Amino acid sequence: MKIVYVPRDTASVSVGADEVADNFATAGFKVIRNGSRGAAWLEPLVEIDTPDGRVGFSCVRPQDVAGLVDNDFQNNAPHLRDVGLIKNIDYFKKQNRQIFAYAGDTDPVSIADYIQYGGFLGLKKALELGAENTVNMVFDSGLRGRGGAAFPTGIKWRTCAAIEAKQKYVVCNADEGDGGTFSDRLLMESNPFALIEGMLICGLAIGANKGYIYLRSEYPLSKTILTEAIANAYKANYLGKNIANSGLDFVIEIRIGAGAYICGEETSLLNSIEGKRGVVRAKPPLPAIEGLFGQPTIINNVITLASVPDILAKGAAYYAALGSGKSTGTLPFQLAGNVKRGGLVEVEFGLTLRQLIEDFGGGTYSGRPIKAVQVGGPLGSYIHPDEFDTPLDYESFAAIDGAIGHGGIIVFDDTADMAAQARFAFTFCEVESCGKCTPCRIGATRGGEILDDISAGKNVEANFELLDDLFETMELGSLCAMGGLTPKPVRSLLKHFADEFIDKGKVL
Amino acid sequence: MVTLNIYPEMAMVKSACQACANKPDMLLEIFHIIQANLGYVPVKAYQQIADALNISRADVFGVVTFYHDFNNSKQAANTITLCQSEACQSMGSAKLKTQLEKSYTVKTVYCLGNCALAPSASIGGKTYGRVDKQRLEAIMEAGL
């Protein structure tokens, strides 16, 4: 029976992949639901095997299936949607894929596929090295937390490993709430075993036998795929007791969030797993010392944990040589919003923003000029085209008052209303603040009111001064990044697009 | 404490708590199960859950009201959950919301993680990308 590959991730399914798969099955094909390669602009990207490798057909609609079967698969006629050999597609060729290297090649829940492409070699190495040297290797790789804060992973692990405790936990933060980001989702839906292996290695390194994946409820398909992958890992004895006859025990439980953005903040997340309101905890104590249920806990983002197996398998030096300066390795950037070729682009740190949005992204979806891009989620700065030549690494972005965050890049064309985007930053904080600390809880509401007054032309100058004062209060007085960084996008908008705020004021 | 008020969903709520071994850290999961069954978490259930988990009704109330996902009444059948975070905004989600509100109940969500195919919506737990008024109307018509 002829095989056809139809991706099963959320993005592909959101534009009809399930119906396409059904139609192929009806036409007598064996349909393999592979992981997505992350080029959302090509989805659903249907593939078939050829002697030279996989050949792809992009943006396939359910009604296209018959034509593909009768003509294109027989090489009768070149098709509009024929994108040729997958390995020759520029969008993929120009990337440096490490964590997503085989996404799309494999059935995401097949252990055999995972092993075929080098899966569990990292775990094997970690078992040879032992706990302490595993921690050292992660430390030496220079890996930094991919959730947004970019804290050195090795230091976190070392802190936790040094504590004596009866019970420790590994918690995976899969509460990917930032607008414009989807790399965690894609990893879980295309390469979930990398996450499972990363958690296993972390458990071994710090001495934990239990892991939790805190997954946001907005990702129901990730839950399905992850649940299947975990079940298969148990069956193959990569989870459970005496894993691969190593003496290592490790179990993983999935916990589903409930629509609270703040639960992506690590201490809120811990409260949420404990069945409580997702309010922020004051630090110290650090979670690495006193975390989930009061026990030492490592909380790492999905991409951070999924980066670990490769570091072990290929060595710290290999990983540390990738990237630029203190930003080692690769980051799966996410091109989103008003962009022609949106999707996941995994590259080494150091590429410029311009290269990413022009060479990969191909400009705006609408075809209009780019006005600004927001980098790093709702708490990240809006970047003006004048700054597009900034290299994408943590330090260079900090130098222009920006942040890489979780690697989300949202493109806006010239029709965007920047004053409205600033207003949204406060609205978002107002809706999503946990309410524990005053600067965030009250500041978000007051900030929005001040912007409303400015746009209505009321005491414009005095209100700008007041806004500046509020920024300082929020930045210095908030318990976590939610309140502390909400001023960031607003400040960047005021810096680059002040006339939009002021003009509005004067006109009205 | 004995729960005196009797309501039709009691058995369902009880089994949800039991499925989670009456563990207090499973509170969110219990709400998810109840909501998946009933479409909402009834206010009357708070005391019963509190009793089962040996926590206070205030704890239950505090948690259920903290999270955006949980409703205390049935949602309208014609509800469309529309993403309104930045990526979708850049593709006109605010305008789309205004258009849809004329005929549907529109619920806001901040990010469905489908940001490269914005704007996105969620209907009946399924995510749809590159949506416009026409496509959503067709989906709603097919589903209702």
Image: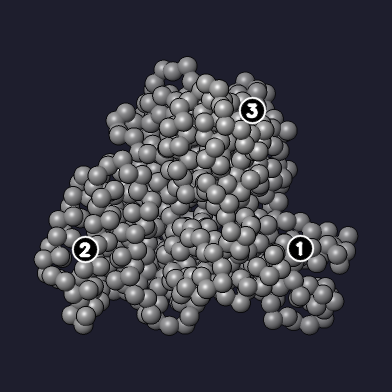
Element at label 1: helix
- The residue type indicated by label 2 comes to Ile
Nearest the viewer among A477 and B116 is A477
Q: Secondary structure at mark 3?
A: helix
Q: Position of residue A13 (x, y in %)?
A: 66, 62
Q: Give the CA separation, mark 1 to mark 3.
A: 38 Å
The residue identified by callout 2 is A450
Same chain check for tags 1 and 2: yes
Q: Amino acid at mark 3?
A: Gln
Hey, what amino acid is under mark 1? Ala
Q: CA distance from mark 2 to mark 3?
A: 49 Å
Quarter of the image where one finds residue A465: bottom left
Q: Label for residue B18?
A: 3
Residue B91 visible in the shown view? no
- x 51%, y 28%: residue: B50
Q: Of A435 and A498, which appears nearest the observer?
A: A435
Looking at the image, can residue A332 be seen? yes
Q: Residue at x 37, y 26 (%)?
A: A289
Q: Determine contact: label 1, label 3, CB under 8 Å.
A: no
- Above or below, comparing residue A34 to residue A152 in the picture: below
- Residue A477, disc: none
- Measure the C-alpha gap from mark 1 to mark 2: 52 Å
Instruction: Give the chain letter at badge 1.
Output: A
Q: Characterize the local packing of mark 3: few (<14), some (14-19) or many (20 or more) Cα atoms within 10 angstroms.
A: some
**Image location of residue A158, percent across then percent down:** 39, 29
Label 2 close to label 3 by CB (< 8 Å): no
Horizontal and vertical percent for residue B45? 56, 36
**Quadrant assignment, res A26:** bottom right
Residue under the point 80% across and 78% down: A67
Residue A21: numbered disc: 1
Q: Which label lies toward us, 1 or 2? A: 2
